[in-house]
């Protein structure tokens, strides 16, 4: 019998999700043995035309990482949706927009001008800005068109499952891969559509080993300003930790190592907006009822939007700045 076909694609992202797949170590051999890998541009030389030539639903499983930032990203998202039986939003960029989604705090025009005309490291005396189509003596050159608004994968195509994380933890990836292989081998039904794989319904705080005593604080600190107690909740020590607004599944690895949760596993099931939940968590630990003092305490939080919506801005209630 023919092997199930696997595709892995990298859209607007940093490449960490592809590295995380390789981090499952020897289990990658199980993947290669069980699946026929038909598309993985990061690892091997596949061409878009090879996938375009496949019948619809010919690919058993596609792990799609990266946000939708350009016309090329959209084309691949639609094509892989049509060619795949199961399409997973793999990682935070695909699931929520993540770091590329912070471009929604400004406009494409402002980003383009800065990148090509204003950045200190740029030498562009002729003020050349790339165009989607350029005619040269040899023919016509085309490049993808960037969008003004970054979107998550579920905002442009129908997605079957989400595997969260920036990147997903390798042990969770290995667990999901093993489960999928087992399901396909034994003919068991897949999980309900929309299931978040490799995570739980609890929050990161539920996994965190640090103790909480509802301590009230009067000052927020940057990580380099204090040496936190290794046993006490980081948020209650004045460090911004997004654990209350982040789903569990990572094993609380960051907070266990003394690093605040950044929020990369996305919002828990009962949270509508990750940033709004963090605002609520911050309000619960501020020890003041004086408006002036509260404003002074909050002023110590750098870049609240970039901190509270670092991974989720395109999927949030805010979506983007109106420009």
Image (cartoon, grey):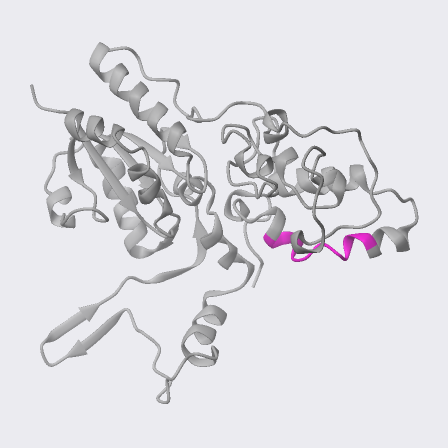
Residue beneath the point at 48% across and 52% down? 99
In the displayed structure, 261 sits above or below 68; it is above
Residue 250 in view in this figure: yes
In the picture provided, is 298 more to the left or to the right than 65?
right
Q: At 26% across and 28% down in the image, what residue appears?
A: 27
Closest to the observer: 248 or 60? 248
Magenta stretch: includes residue 4: no
Q: Position of residue 254 (x, y in %)?
A: 55, 39
Image quarter for residue 243?
A: top right
* Horizontal side, residue 304 vs residue 49: left or right: right
User: In the rendered image of this protein, does residue 174 appear above or below residue 124?
Assistant: above
Extreme residue toward the bottom, this view = 125
Q: Residue 57 is drawn in which quadrant?
A: top left
- Please name the residue shown 75% across and 45% down the image: 238
Say which quarter of the image contains residue 65: top left
* In the displayed structure image, the side of residue 23 where residue 185 appears, left or right: left
Residue 301 shown in magenta:
yes
Left or right placement of residue 156 versus residue 283 in this view: left
Q: How many marks?
A: 0
- Figure check: 129 above or below 280: below
Q: Quadrant of the C terminus?
A: bottom right
Residue at 68%, 57% in the rendered image? 302
Image quarter where the N terminus lies is top left
Q: Position of residue 210 (x, y in %)?
A: 67, 30
Where residue 121 appears, as percent x and y from the top left, is 43, 79
Kindly give the residue lying farthest to the right in the view shown. 290
* Residue 57 seen in this snapshot: no
What span is in magenta? 297-306
User: Could you say which is closer to the camera, residue 269 or residue 205?
Assistant: 205
Compared with residue 229, is residue 113 higher up or lower down, i.e. above or below?
Answer: below
Q: Could you say where residue 66 lies in the image, as x and y percent from the top left?
A: 37, 47
């Amino acid at each position: 019998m023919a092997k199930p076909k696997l595709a892995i694609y990298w859209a607007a992202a940093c490449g960490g999700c592809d590295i995380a797949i390789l981090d499952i170590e020897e289990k990658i051999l199980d993947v290669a043995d069980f699946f026929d890998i038909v598309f993985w541009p990061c690892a091997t030389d596949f061409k878009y035309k090879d996938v375009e030539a496949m019948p619809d639903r010919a690919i058993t499983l596609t792990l799609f990482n990266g946000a939708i930032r350009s016309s090329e990203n959209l084309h691949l998202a639609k094509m892989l949706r049509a060619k795949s039986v199961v399409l997973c939003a793999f990682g935070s960029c695909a699931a929520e927009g993540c770091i590329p989604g912070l471009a929604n705090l400004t406009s494409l025009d402002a980003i383009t001008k800065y990148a090509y005309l204003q950045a200190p490291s740029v030498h562009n005396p002729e003020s050349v800005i790339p165009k989607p189509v350029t005619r040269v003596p040899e023919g016509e050159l085309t490049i993808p068109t960037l969008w003004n608004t970054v979107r998550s994968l579920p905002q442009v195509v129908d997605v079957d499952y989400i595997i969260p994380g920036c990147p997903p933890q390798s042990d969770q990836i290995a667990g999901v891969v093993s489960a999928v292989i087992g399901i396909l081998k034994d003919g068991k039904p897949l999980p309900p559509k929309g299931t978040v794989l490799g995570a739980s319904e609890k929050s990161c705080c539920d996994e965190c080993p640090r103790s909480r005593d509802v301590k009230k604080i009067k000052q927020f600190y940057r990580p380099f300003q204090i040496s936190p107690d290794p046993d006490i909740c980081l948020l209650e020590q004045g460090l911004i930790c997004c654990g209350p607004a982040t789903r569990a599944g990572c094993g609380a690895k960051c907070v266990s190592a003394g690093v605040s949760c950044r929020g990369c596993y996305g919002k828990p099931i009962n949270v509508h907006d990750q940033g709004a939940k963090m605002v609520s968590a911050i309000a619960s630990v501020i020890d003041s009822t004086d408006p002036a003092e509260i404003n002074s305490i909050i002023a110590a939080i750098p870049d609240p939007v970039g901190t509270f919506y670092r991974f989720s801005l395109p999927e949030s209630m805010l979506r983007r700045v109106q420009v």
